[in-house]
Image (cartoon, rainbow, N blue to C red):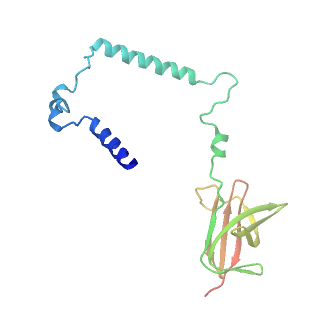
Amino acid sequence: MRKVIICLLILGIFASYRVVTAEEVDWNSIGNPDNAWDGQKPITNKEFEQVITELEKRKKGNKKANKPQKGQEMNKANETELLSNINTAIPLLNLPVSAIIGEKVLIPGHYKVIGEKVGDKIYLKFYQGHYMVAKTEAYETEDDFNSEEIYFLKYETVSGNQLKIMFGSMEFNAFAFVPYLTE
C-alpha cells in the first residue's frame, strides 16, 4: 500500500510541472547582435571627460596619502627588510666521490653543511638527515668565490686528490680542504 501511495505521489509531482518545448523559446532574442546594446545609454564626450578628471584627482590624492608622516618609517627601499627576506635555506652539497673527513669516510651523496664559528675557529659540519656524520675545521676568508648568492656551498678539485669545499653565509665565508678516494 505504501509503495502505491509513494508512486502516485512521485507521479503527481512530475505531472504538476509544466513541460517546456523548444518551440516556446524565442530564439531571436538570444545572442542577437542587433539587441546587444539594449538597456545601455550612450555617453557624451563631456561625461567621459568628467570621469577621467575624477580618476586623475583620485590618483593624485592617493600619492599624497602614501607619503610617510614625520616619525614614520618608510617601507619602500628599506634595506633591512631586503636583507631579512634573503633565502636562508641551508645549502646542500652533492658529493660525487668518497671523501675522508677526520676518521670518517663520507660516501657519495647529498649532505647538509652548516658552518659554525666557535671562538676563533670555524667548523663545517656535515649532516645527513638529522645526524651529524662528520666535522672538519675550515679557514675563514673574505673571498666570496664568485658566488652570486650570500648562502652558498661549492666544491672544486685541487691537486693531490683533494676537494676544496667552499661555504658562505651572512656571518662568514670559509673553505676546507678534504681528501677524497679515487675509485
**Residue at 30 percent of width and 43 percent of height:** 11
Q: Is residue 83 above or below residue 93?
A: above
Tell me where residue 76 sits by quadrant. Answer: top right
Q: Is residue 144 left or right of residue 44?
A: right
Q: Is residue 60 left or right of residue 47?
A: right
Q: Nearer the viewer, residue 1 or 136?
A: 1
Percent across and percent down for residue 101 are 73, 77
Q: Nearer the viewer, residue 10 or 63?
A: 10
| Numbered-mark total | 0
**Residue at 60 percent of width and 36 percent of height:** 77
Percent across and percent down for residue 106 are 69, 78
Which residue appears farthest toward the front when viewing the image?
1
Q: Is residue 56 left or right of residue 31?
A: right
Q: Is residue 62 above or below residue 28?
A: above
Q: Is residue 144 above or below residue 24?
A: below
Percent across and percent down for residue 177 are 70, 74
Q: Nearer the viewer, residue 67 or 34?
A: 34
Tell me where residue 64 sits by quadrant. Answer: top right
**Residue at 32 percent of width and 13 percent of height:** 47
Tell me where residue 91 sits by quadrant. Answer: bottom right
Q: Is residue 122 above or below residue 39?
A: below
Percent across and percent down for residue 15 are 27, 38
User: Which corner quadrant holds the C terminus?
Assistant: bottom right
Which residue appears farthest toward the top when viewing the image?
46
Which residue appears farthest toward the right when viewing the image?
119
